[in-house]
Image: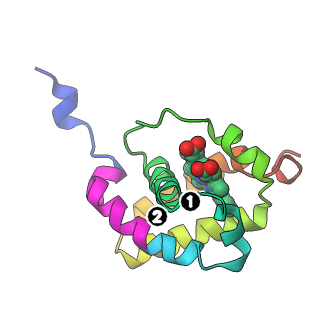
Amino acid sequence: MTVTEETAPASHYDRIGGASSVKAAVELFYEKVLVDPALAGYFADVDMAGQRRHLALMLTVVLGGPNEYTGRGLAEAHQPLNIPVEHYAKVGEYLTVTLTELGVPADILADVQIVLGQVQDQVVAAGDRSDA
Ligand code: HEM
């Protein structure tokens, strides 16, 4: 019997409703990020499907969902984009607002903030890293 399977706490990803909730969140999040003039430019050459995929991957990562992603690492994908910390903060804020609008519980939101802090140095430009 696999006790761990029955007693392991559900991930945040599962608690908010898994893939279908992430999909709903992506729609809301997308409307905020892609209409912000400071952020839209990053995605100008990325096709629509790629943009939505990005947001879904981002949400899945910060919610501790299943890691089915086999693409480039976060640093490899973002370092060429030279993202300043202000833009990273904006995206994080839109993510928090989106999850709040969807009624995601406070403990999950708090953990999302922690993950956003943890991956920041991989995403932002080298000169803007917290240890720089
Ligand atoms: C927690 C923060 C973030 C996570 C977890 C994340 C996740 C990812 C992942 C997994 C990829 C790789 C996609 C691929 O290679 O197919 C990617 C690419 C990308 N990310 Fe992020 N990202 C984050 C923050 C940001 C921010 C703040 C921006 C811009 C302001 C951004 C813009 C992009 C762009 C433009 C791409 C390239 C998309 C493409 O070429 O298809 N990301 N991101």
Looking at the image, which residue sits at the far left?
1
- The residue carrying pointer 2 sits among few (fewer than 14), some (14 to 19) or many (20 or more) residues within 10 Å by Cα, namely many
**Residue at position x 84%, y 46% in the image:** 126
User: Does residue 37 appear anywhere in the picture?
Assistant: yes
Front position in the image: 127 or 33:
33
Q: Is residue 117 left or right of residue 10?
A: right
Asked if ligand 1 lies within 8 A of label 1, the reply is: no
**Residue at position x 34%, y 74% in the image:** 103
Q: Is residue 39 magenta?
A: no
User: Does residue 105 appear anywhere in the picture?
Assistant: no
Q: Which mark is residue 109?
A: 2
Q: Secondary structure at mark 1?
A: helix
Q: Is residue 18 magenta?
A: yes
Residue 118, x across and y down, in percent: 63, 47
Q: Quadrant of the N terminus?
A: top left
Q: Which mark is residue 113?
A: 1
Going by the numbered disc 2, the residue's amino acid type is: Leu
Q: Main secondary structure of the magenta part?
A: helix
Asked if disc 2 and disc 1 are in contact, CB closer than 8 Å, the reply is yes
